[in-house]
Amino acid sequence: MEQKTVFIVDDDMTNLTVGADALADSFNVFTFNSGGLLLKRLKKQVPDMILLDVDMPGLSGYDVIGEIKGDKETEHIPVIFLTAKSDCRSELEGLSLGAIDYIIKPFSPPLLLKRIEVHLLVEAQKKELQDFNDNLQERVETKTKTVVELQNAIIRAMTRLVDRRDDITGGHIERTQRYMSVMLNKVLEHGLFKEESLSWDLNLVLQSTQLHDIGKIAIKDSILLKPGQLTSEEFESIKTHPIVGEDVILEIEKNTSEHKFLEYAKIFAATHHERWDGSGYPRGLLGEEIPVLGRILAVVDVYDALVSDRPYKNGLSHKEAITIIADGRGTHFDPVVGDLFLSVADQFHQIALQQ
Protein backbone atom coordinates (compact mmCIF):
# COMPACT_ATOMS: atom_id res chain seq x y z
CA MET A 1 0.00 0.00 0.00
CA GLU A 2 1.28 3.47 -0.89
CA GLN A 3 2.72 5.35 2.09
CA LYS A 4 0.91 8.39 3.40
CA THR A 5 2.62 11.78 3.33
CA VAL A 6 3.11 13.86 6.47
CA PHE A 7 4.37 17.46 6.62
CA ILE A 8 6.05 18.64 9.84
CA VAL A 9 6.32 22.39 10.47
CA ASP A 10 8.48 23.72 13.33
CA ASP A 11 11.06 26.46 13.65
CA ASP A 12 13.14 24.22 15.98
CA MET A 13 15.44 21.93 13.99
CA THR A 14 15.67 19.45 16.87
CA ASN A 15 11.90 18.95 16.84
CA LEU A 16 11.94 18.55 13.07
CA THR A 17 14.69 15.94 13.27
CA VAL A 18 13.09 13.97 16.09
CA GLY A 19 9.70 14.02 14.37
CA ALA A 20 11.12 13.02 10.99
CA ASP A 21 13.13 10.14 12.50
CA ALA A 22 10.08 8.86 14.40
CA LEU A 23 7.90 8.79 11.29
CA ALA A 24 10.37 8.00 8.50
CA ASP A 25 9.78 4.23 8.48
CA SER A 26 6.01 4.58 8.21
CA PHE A 27 5.42 7.72 6.15
CA ASN A 28 6.82 9.98 3.49
CA VAL A 29 7.95 12.89 5.68
CA PHE A 30 8.73 16.46 4.61
CA THR A 31 9.91 19.13 7.06
CA PHE A 32 9.50 22.93 6.97
CA ASN A 33 10.96 25.47 9.40
CA SER A 34 8.34 28.16 8.76
CA GLY A 35 4.66 28.50 8.02
CA GLY A 36 5.43 30.47 4.88
CA LEU A 37 7.42 27.60 3.37
CA LEU A 38 4.59 25.19 4.17
CA LEU A 39 1.96 27.34 2.47
CA LYS A 40 4.18 27.68 -0.58
CA ARG A 41 4.58 23.89 -0.79
CA LEU A 42 0.85 23.30 -0.38
CA LYS A 43 0.27 25.01 -3.72
CA LYS A 44 2.16 22.11 -5.33
CA GLN A 45 1.54 19.14 -3.03
CA VAL A 46 -1.25 18.20 -0.62
CA PRO A 47 -0.21 15.84 2.21
CA ASP A 48 -2.35 13.39 4.15
CA MET A 49 -1.57 15.17 7.44
CA ILE A 50 0.23 18.22 8.81
CA LEU A 51 1.99 18.46 12.17
CA LEU A 52 2.06 22.20 12.89
CA ASP A 53 3.98 24.08 15.60
CA VAL A 54 1.95 26.81 17.27
CA ASP A 55 4.70 29.23 18.34
CA MET A 56 6.77 30.27 15.34
CA PRO A 57 8.23 33.63 14.31
CA GLY A 58 6.36 35.36 11.51
CA LEU A 59 3.28 33.29 10.82
CA SER A 60 2.12 31.44 13.93
CA GLY A 61 0.47 28.04 13.78
CA TYR A 62 -2.86 29.73 14.33
CA ASP A 63 -2.23 31.99 11.32
CA VAL A 64 -1.21 29.03 9.16
CA ILE A 65 -4.19 26.84 10.00
CA GLY A 66 -6.45 29.77 9.17
CA GLU A 67 -4.91 29.84 5.68
CA ILE A 68 -5.22 26.06 5.32
CA LYS A 69 -8.86 25.86 6.40
CA GLY A 70 -9.77 28.90 4.33
CA ASP A 71 -8.68 27.26 1.07
CA LYS A 72 -11.01 24.71 -0.56
CA GLU A 73 -7.98 22.82 -1.91
CA THR A 74 -6.51 22.26 1.56
CA GLU A 75 -9.37 22.60 4.06
CA HIS A 76 -9.77 18.83 4.27
CA ILE A 77 -6.17 18.18 5.43
CA PRO A 78 -6.09 17.00 9.08
CA VAL A 79 -3.85 19.21 11.23
CA ILE A 80 -2.29 18.28 14.57
CA PHE A 81 -0.83 21.12 16.61
CA LEU A 82 2.58 20.73 18.26
CA THR A 83 3.16 23.06 21.21
CA ALA A 84 4.95 23.52 24.49
CA LYS A 85 1.80 25.11 25.93
CA SER A 86 -0.25 22.81 28.11
CA ASP A 87 -3.08 25.10 29.25
CA CYS A 88 -6.65 24.28 28.32
CA ARG A 89 -7.27 27.69 26.78
CA SER A 90 -4.52 27.24 24.18
CA GLU A 91 -5.73 23.72 23.40
CA LEU A 92 -9.33 24.87 23.01
CA GLU A 93 -8.28 27.70 20.70
CA GLY A 94 -6.36 25.29 18.48
CA LEU A 95 -9.23 22.84 18.25
CA SER A 96 -11.71 25.62 17.52
CA LEU A 97 -9.58 26.66 14.54
CA GLY A 98 -9.91 23.20 13.02
CA ALA A 99 -7.08 21.14 14.48
CA ILE A 100 -7.95 17.50 15.18
CA ASP A 101 -5.46 17.01 18.03
CA TYR A 102 -2.99 18.83 20.27
CA ILE A 103 0.37 17.21 21.14
CA ILE A 104 2.56 18.67 23.88
CA LYS A 105 6.31 19.03 23.25
CA PRO A 106 8.67 17.43 23.93
CA PHE A 107 6.75 14.49 22.49
CA SER A 108 7.41 10.77 22.75
CA PRO A 109 8.26 9.44 19.24
CA PRO A 110 6.31 6.16 19.70
CA LEU A 111 3.31 8.07 21.04
CA LEU A 112 3.51 10.57 18.18
CA LEU A 113 3.58 7.71 15.66
CA LYS A 114 0.63 5.95 17.26
CA ARG A 115 -1.55 9.10 17.41
CA ILE A 116 -0.86 9.88 13.78
CA GLU A 117 -1.74 6.32 12.76
CA VAL A 118 -5.01 6.51 14.70
CA HIS A 119 -5.99 9.84 13.15
CA LEU A 120 -5.13 8.70 9.64
CA LEU A 121 -7.22 5.58 10.20
CA VAL A 122 -10.13 7.74 11.31
CA GLU A 123 -9.71 9.95 8.25
CA ALA A 124 -9.62 6.89 5.98
CA GLN A 125 -12.81 5.57 7.58
CA LYS A 126 -14.49 8.96 7.17
CA LYS A 127 -13.56 9.01 3.48
CA GLU A 128 -14.75 5.44 3.03
CA LEU A 129 -18.06 6.31 4.69
CA GLN A 130 -18.41 9.43 2.55
CA ASP A 131 -17.73 7.43 -0.62
CA PHE A 132 -20.30 4.87 0.49
CA ASN A 133 -22.87 7.61 1.19
CA ASP A 134 -22.18 9.26 -2.15
CA ASN A 135 -22.65 5.96 -3.99
CA LEU A 136 -25.71 5.13 -1.91
CA GLN A 137 -27.20 8.53 -2.70
CA GLU A 138 -26.59 7.95 -6.39
CA ARG A 139 -28.26 4.54 -6.22
CA VAL A 140 -31.19 5.95 -4.27
CA GLU A 141 -31.60 8.81 -6.75
CA THR A 142 -31.56 6.36 -9.67
CA LYS A 143 -34.15 4.15 -7.99
CA THR A 144 -36.26 7.15 -7.01
CA LYS A 145 -36.16 8.48 -10.55
CA THR A 146 -37.42 5.13 -11.84
CA VAL A 147 -40.24 5.05 -9.29
CA VAL A 148 -41.21 8.66 -10.02
CA GLU A 149 -41.27 7.99 -13.76
CA LEU A 150 -43.55 5.00 -13.19
CA GLN A 151 -45.74 7.03 -10.84
CA ASN A 152 -46.04 9.84 -13.37
CA ALA A 153 -46.86 7.40 -16.17
CA ILE A 154 -49.67 5.90 -14.08
CA ILE A 155 -50.99 9.33 -13.15
CA ARG A 156 -50.96 10.49 -16.76
CA ALA A 157 -52.84 7.37 -17.80
CA MET A 158 -55.46 7.90 -15.08
CA THR A 159 -55.98 11.58 -15.79
CA ARG A 160 -56.11 11.14 -19.57
CA LEU A 161 -58.73 8.47 -19.05
CA VAL A 162 -60.85 11.12 -17.36
CA ASP A 163 -59.89 13.85 -19.82
CA ARG A 164 -60.76 11.75 -22.88
CA ARG A 165 -64.24 11.06 -21.61
CA ASP A 166 -64.95 14.66 -22.59
CA ASP A 167 -63.00 14.92 -25.84
CA ILE A 168 -64.28 18.44 -26.44
CA THR A 169 -62.09 19.66 -23.56
CA GLY A 170 -59.15 17.38 -24.25
CA GLY A 171 -55.85 18.89 -23.12
CA HIS A 172 -57.39 20.56 -20.05
CA ILE A 173 -55.02 18.71 -17.71
CA GLU A 174 -51.87 19.66 -19.63
CA ARG A 175 -52.95 23.30 -19.92
CA THR A 176 -53.78 23.37 -16.22
CA GLN A 177 -50.23 22.34 -15.37
CA ARG A 178 -48.79 25.05 -17.60
CA TYR A 179 -51.09 27.75 -16.19
CA MET A 180 -50.24 26.64 -12.64
CA SER A 181 -46.53 26.82 -13.41
CA VAL A 182 -46.94 30.45 -14.50
CA MET A 183 -48.93 31.32 -11.37
CA LEU A 184 -46.62 29.56 -8.92
CA ASN A 185 -43.53 31.17 -10.38
CA LYS A 186 -45.21 34.56 -9.98
CA VAL A 187 -46.13 33.75 -6.37
CA LEU A 188 -42.49 32.98 -5.59
CA GLU A 189 -41.23 35.98 -7.54
CA HIS A 190 -43.38 38.34 -5.47
CA GLY A 191 -42.85 36.50 -2.17
CA LEU A 192 -46.59 35.91 -1.68
CA PHE A 193 -48.10 33.42 0.79
CA LYS A 194 -44.61 32.85 2.26
CA GLU A 195 -45.73 30.60 5.09
CA GLU A 196 -47.17 28.12 2.59
CA SER A 197 -45.09 28.67 -0.54
CA LEU A 198 -41.70 28.13 1.10
CA SER A 199 -42.72 24.55 1.92
CA TRP A 200 -43.95 23.68 -1.58
CA ASP A 201 -42.17 21.08 -3.65
CA LEU A 202 -43.00 22.62 -7.02
CA ASN A 203 -42.38 19.45 -9.02
CA LEU A 204 -44.81 17.52 -6.85
CA VAL A 205 -47.32 20.38 -6.85
CA LEU A 206 -47.38 20.55 -10.65
CA GLN A 207 -47.57 16.78 -11.02
CA SER A 208 -50.41 16.54 -8.53
CA THR A 209 -52.57 19.07 -10.41
CA GLN A 210 -53.21 16.27 -12.90
CA LEU A 211 -55.49 14.61 -10.36
CA HIS A 212 -57.75 17.59 -9.65
CA ASP A 213 -60.60 16.25 -11.79
CA ILE A 214 -60.09 12.56 -11.04
CA GLY A 215 -63.51 12.49 -9.35
CA LYS A 216 -65.20 12.99 -12.72
CA ILE A 217 -64.56 9.32 -13.36
CA ALA A 218 -67.72 8.69 -11.31
CA ILE A 219 -69.90 11.11 -13.28
CA LYS A 220 -72.20 9.58 -15.90
CA ASP A 221 -71.39 10.29 -19.53
CA SER A 222 -74.96 11.45 -20.06
CA ILE A 223 -74.26 14.30 -17.65
CA LEU A 224 -70.62 14.96 -18.45
CA LEU A 225 -71.24 15.10 -22.21
CA LYS A 226 -74.69 16.68 -22.16
CA PRO A 227 -74.83 19.29 -24.94
CA GLY A 228 -77.42 21.43 -23.17
CA GLN A 229 -77.93 23.09 -19.82
CA LEU A 230 -77.80 20.75 -16.82
CA THR A 231 -80.83 20.25 -14.61
CA SER A 232 -80.54 21.01 -10.91
CA GLU A 233 -80.28 17.29 -10.19
CA GLU A 234 -77.58 16.81 -12.81
CA PHE A 235 -75.60 19.75 -11.48
CA GLU A 236 -75.78 18.27 -7.99
CA SER A 237 -74.25 15.12 -9.45
CA ILE A 238 -71.44 17.15 -11.04
CA LYS A 239 -70.82 18.84 -7.69
CA THR A 240 -69.94 15.47 -6.13
CA HIS A 241 -66.75 15.07 -8.17
CA PRO A 242 -64.45 16.97 -5.73
CA ILE A 243 -65.46 14.66 -2.86
CA VAL A 244 -65.19 11.58 -5.07
CA GLY A 245 -61.74 12.72 -6.17
CA GLU A 246 -60.65 13.30 -2.58
CA ASP A 247 -61.90 9.83 -1.61
CA VAL A 248 -60.00 8.24 -4.51
CA ILE A 249 -56.79 9.92 -3.40
CA LEU A 250 -57.40 8.94 0.23
CA GLU A 251 -57.73 5.34 -0.90
CA ILE A 252 -54.42 5.57 -2.76
CA GLU A 253 -52.86 7.17 0.33
CA LYS A 254 -53.67 4.09 2.43
CA ASN A 255 -51.38 1.99 0.24
CA THR A 256 -48.37 4.24 -0.19
CA SER A 257 -45.80 6.13 1.86
CA GLU A 258 -45.63 9.00 -0.70
CA HIS A 259 -47.99 11.30 1.15
CA LYS A 260 -46.63 14.74 0.16
CA PHE A 261 -47.66 14.34 -3.47
CA LEU A 262 -51.07 13.06 -2.38
CA GLU A 263 -51.55 15.90 0.10
CA TYR A 264 -51.26 18.37 -2.77
CA ALA A 265 -53.53 16.22 -4.92
CA LYS A 266 -56.21 16.13 -2.20
CA ILE A 267 -56.15 19.91 -1.92
CA PHE A 268 -56.59 20.32 -5.66
CA ALA A 269 -59.29 17.68 -5.98
CA ALA A 270 -61.33 18.85 -3.00
CA THR A 271 -61.05 22.65 -3.16
CA HIS A 272 -60.74 23.88 -6.74
CA HIS A 273 -64.50 24.66 -6.87
CA GLU A 274 -64.61 26.48 -3.54
CA ARG A 275 -65.24 30.26 -3.70
CA TRP A 276 -63.71 33.09 -1.72
CA ASP A 277 -67.16 34.26 -0.52
CA GLY A 278 -68.13 30.78 0.73
CA SER A 279 -70.64 30.06 -2.04
CA GLY A 280 -68.59 27.29 -3.68
CA TYR A 281 -68.73 23.54 -3.32
CA PRO A 282 -68.41 20.88 -1.98
CA ARG A 283 -67.93 22.31 1.54
CA GLY A 284 -68.66 26.02 1.18
CA LEU A 285 -65.27 27.04 2.56
CA LEU A 286 -64.85 30.76 3.14
CA GLY A 287 -61.83 32.96 2.39
CA GLU A 288 -58.59 31.69 3.91
CA GLU A 289 -60.30 28.44 4.92
CA ILE A 290 -59.54 27.48 1.34
CA PRO A 291 -55.90 26.35 0.97
CA VAL A 292 -53.73 28.70 -1.10
CA LEU A 293 -53.14 26.06 -3.78
CA GLY A 294 -56.88 25.51 -4.09
CA ARG A 295 -57.42 29.26 -4.50
CA ILE A 296 -54.83 29.42 -7.27
CA LEU A 297 -56.23 26.41 -9.11
CA ALA A 298 -59.72 27.91 -8.89
CA VAL A 299 -58.63 30.80 -11.14
CA VAL A 300 -56.71 28.51 -13.46
CA ASP A 301 -59.59 26.07 -13.80
CA VAL A 302 -62.18 28.77 -14.46
CA TYR A 303 -60.00 30.48 -17.08
CA ASP A 304 -59.55 27.25 -19.00
CA ALA A 305 -63.27 26.48 -18.74
CA LEU A 306 -64.18 29.94 -20.03
CA VAL A 307 -61.94 29.93 -23.11
CA SER A 308 -62.50 26.26 -24.03
CA ASP A 309 -65.37 24.80 -26.03
CA ARG A 310 -67.63 22.59 -23.95
CA PRO A 311 -70.53 20.33 -24.98
CA TYR A 312 -72.97 22.99 -23.77
CA LYS A 313 -71.17 26.17 -24.99
CA ASN A 314 -68.56 27.73 -27.23
CA GLY A 315 -65.39 29.07 -25.67
CA LEU A 316 -65.23 32.78 -24.82
CA SER A 317 -62.50 35.12 -25.98
CA HIS A 318 -59.46 35.77 -23.82
CA LYS A 319 -60.65 39.33 -23.23
CA GLU A 320 -64.07 38.14 -22.06
CA ALA A 321 -62.45 35.62 -19.71
CA ILE A 322 -60.26 38.33 -18.18
CA THR A 323 -63.31 40.52 -17.56
CA ILE A 324 -65.20 37.70 -15.83
CA ILE A 325 -62.26 36.80 -13.57
CA ALA A 326 -61.57 40.46 -12.76
CA ASP A 327 -65.23 40.90 -11.80
CA GLY A 328 -64.98 37.79 -9.60
CA ARG A 329 -62.20 39.17 -7.40
CA GLY A 330 -63.38 39.16 -3.80
CA THR A 331 -66.41 36.99 -4.52
CA HIS A 332 -65.47 33.95 -6.56
CA PHE A 333 -61.69 34.44 -6.24
CA ASP A 334 -59.15 35.45 -3.63
CA PRO A 335 -58.43 39.10 -4.58
CA VAL A 336 -54.66 38.57 -4.32
CA VAL A 337 -54.82 35.54 -6.61
CA GLY A 338 -57.11 37.43 -8.98
CA ASP A 339 -54.60 40.28 -9.24
CA LEU A 340 -51.83 37.75 -9.75
CA PHE A 341 -53.74 36.21 -12.65
CA LEU A 342 -54.31 39.61 -14.26
CA SER A 343 -50.56 40.28 -14.14
CA VAL A 344 -49.81 37.10 -16.14
CA ALA A 345 -52.95 36.93 -18.28
CA ASP A 346 -50.98 37.41 -21.50
CA GLN A 347 -49.00 34.24 -20.74
CA PHE A 348 -52.28 32.36 -20.21
CA HIS A 349 -53.46 33.58 -23.58
CA GLN A 350 -50.37 32.23 -25.32
CA ILE A 351 -50.84 28.82 -23.67
CA ALA A 352 -54.53 28.76 -24.64
CA LEU A 353 -53.70 29.58 -28.27
CA GLN A 354 -51.54 26.46 -28.45
CA GLN A 355 -54.43 24.09 -27.72
Image (spheres, rainbow, N blue to C red):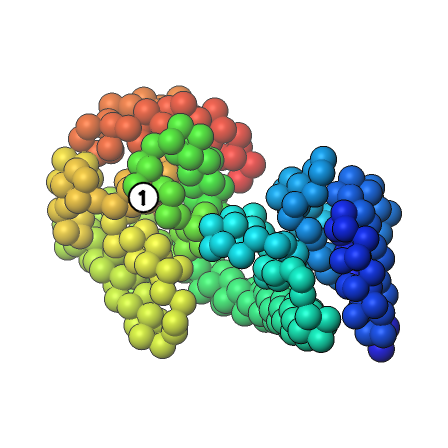
Q: Which residue is mark 1?
A: 196
- Where disc 1 sits, the SS reads helix
User: Residue 16 falls in which quadrant of the image?
Assistant: bottom right
Indicate left or right for 113 with 295 as reference.
right
Say which residue appears at 53% left-offset and 57% top-offset. 86
Nearest the eye: 163 or 179: 179
Q: Is residue 229 above or below residue 256?
A: above
User: Residue 176 falls in which quadrant of the image?
Assistant: top left
Q: Is residue 47 visible?
A: no
Query: Residue 212: x percent and y percent?
Result: 35, 54
Indicate left or right for 15 with 346 as reference.
right
Say which residue appears at 43% left-offset and 50% top-offset. 201
Query: Residue 194: x percent and y percent?
Result: 33, 37
Q: Is residue 70 above or below residue 85?
A: above
Quarter of the rendering occupied by the N terminus: bottom right
Query: Residue 268: x percent and y percent?
Result: 32, 51
Query: Residue 170: x percent and y percent?
Result: 47, 50
Number of residues whose C-alpha sits closer than 10 Å to that of mark 1, classed few (under 14), some (14–19) or many (20 or more): few
Nearest the eye: 221 or 303: 303
Say which residue appears at 80% left-offset and 69% top-offset. 23
Q: Is residue 64 above or below residue 86?
A: above
Q: Is residue 278 visible?
A: yes
Say which amino acid is labelled 1: Glu
Say which residue appears at 14% left-offset and 41% top-offset. 286
Nearest the eye: 14 or 219: 14
